[in-house]
Image (cartoon, coloured by chain):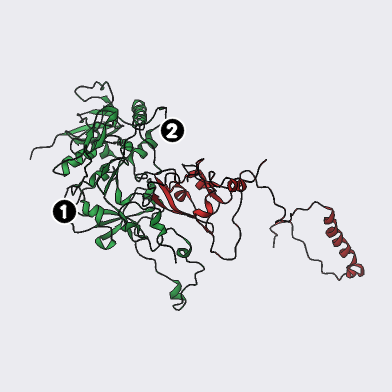
Amino acid sequence: MQALTNKAQAVNREPMTFWERLYLINIIKGMFITFSHMFKKQPTIHYPEQKREFSPVFRGLHVLNRDEEGRERCTACGLCAVACPAEAITMEAAERVAGEEGLYREEKYAAKYEINMLRCIFCGLCEEACPKDAIYLSETFAPANFTRKGFIYGKTDLLIPNPKTEASALAMAKGVEA
Amino acid sequence: MSEQILFKVTIDNITIEVPAGTTILQAARLVGGQVAPPAMCYYSKLQGSGGKCRTCLVEVSKGSEKDPRPMPKLVASCRTTVMDGMEVKNITSEKVVDARAGVVEFLLLNHPLDCPICDQAGECHLQDLSFEHGKADTRYEFQRRTFKKHDLGKNIQLHMTRCILCYRCVFTADQLTNKRVHGILDRGDHSEIATHIEKSLDNEFIGNVIDVCPVGALTDKTFRFKNRVWFLKPMDAHRDCPTCAGRVTLWNRGDEVYRVTARKDQWGEIEDTPDGKTGWICNTCRFDKKETTDWIIEGPREISRQSVIAQGHYSGNIGTTKPHETFEAVNGGRQPHLLMDIHDESEVNMPSVHLGQIHGPSHGDTFNNTNKA
């Protein structure tokens, strides 16, 4: 039968010689490779203590934005949900009533806004679809968990701290810059 | 019976024969597709409509067989009748494309472009028009006209800022109800749809102004902010209504009826019933019958696949019947072990909240009063 490639090699079935039976040379050869790695640059890092820098285009966990006056930008237009290929985003819209003008930017707002992080593929299409600058992908990722509960992120998990009332929390979330 | 006189008319190099007295727009609609000019104010089911918005402008390059001179200016195709041997250019004419872009710019001068909030988004003719024929930018730098919010009764919401003054709702009230109580007040830039002294529109057929409105100026208050139209499931349904034909489209989420509208054809106009009348529906059908048990459901409504409403919908009867559970059948009646029921965690689409039953828009406490178990 003709071989498909020319890489096939016949197995050597001859009995091993004395030196081969000792294995010593091959063990020394192998250990040399192993120990040589002690003097090479480490490819891994000690994760919780050390962290890698994300690339500038990293797409992480979502945040819901507020404007300068601390009002929620989202108007529950549903464009993120319709753009979402994983169908991870759901929301319920509500009408702003008198007295809520300081909370919500527009006449309609998202009373409930949820992202199912089990479904999300972090493609960033929601960010691109948003006409109101309301949703952004940040530079963190969702923490791991043993159960599925807690992966439905609601508005309390997603909204950024209010720049008016929680300025220090916002600065901390942004990462303190000098 | 006298022989009907047929006129030969060529629109965008397609020749058809139509009866004398047909408008160019109607003839173009018979050809269909891209040849039909867009229309914002003309509504074939309303007498006297048309001639206001100028979006249906076409070029007549040959007047008729007897008088082959072209018409000097672009003409409104909804109000111009065909002549024998007329040659019309719609999208094949550069003048028309340019003029239409200008018309769109004018229509959008005072339009607030609040589509993310507007309930009409997704089925708005102005959205389609500006997407297909408009320019990407605006050159307008002045303050847009604004109006105080008027209240037209408990079922109809008026957003005058979005209005393009097409007069369709005025014609609807004139021709469907015995006494019109709303109209256009003031002139020019100040014109607005209003009832003069705050009055509510409460005629039994006045709800049809919502369906004829090409933009989101008149919207259904019972559906206000409930959901976006493209997340709803349009279903054809009918009921035995003593006042109207009762043939409607239900807009459902799950089994809940969120909105009831008349059935609309491919031009966005209300469809005719089998007996040839226009299928206007009454307020009872539109605003009060929000239970699935009120209706006999015929099946899913066909939506043009170009429409955003068609996203996530399948043609045919898929989704109208509950899928057959195979797990129990093959496992001897054993229920699957669910790792998580989404309703335990999610606060969206809660089984305890029935948005279809709430009359007006929901507010923050609509969802907060019914805390999850």
Task: Please name whichever residue, B321 or B25, is drawn nearer the observer in this view of the structure.
Answer: B321
**Callout 1: residue from which chain?**
B
Q: CA distance from mark 1 to mark 2?
A: 45 Å
Would you name the residue on which mark 2 appears? B136
Q: In this view, which residue lies farthest toward the left?
A: B1
Q: How many C-alpha atoms fall within 10 Å of the one at disc 1: few (<14), some, or many (≥20)?
A: few
Q: Colour of chain A?
A: red
Q: Quadrant of the C terminus of chain A?
A: top right
- Label 2 residue SS: loop
Q: How many C-alpha atoms fall within 10 Å of the one at disc 2: few (<14), some, or many (≥20)?
A: few
Report whether mark 1 lies on the same chain as mark 2.
yes
- Where is residue A112, by image quadrant? bottom left
Residue shown at 19% from the left, 59% from the top:
B240
**Callout 2: residue from which chain?**
B
Residue type indicated by callout 2: Ala
Q: Position of residue B102 (x, y in %)?
A: 36, 28
Residue type indicated by callout 1: Thr
Q: Colour of chain B?
A: green
Is residue B217 depicted above or below A19 in this figure? above
Q: Position of residue A21 (x, y in %)?
A: 89, 70
Q: Quadrant of the N terminus of chain A?
A: bottom right
Would you name the residue on which mark 1 appears? B243
Task: Point out the tag, 1 or 2, that comes first from the N-terminus.
Answer: 2
- Label 1 residue SS: loop
Front disc: 1 or 2: 1
The reply to whether residue A161 is in sight is yes
Answer with left or right where residue B260 lies relative to residue B3.
Answer: right
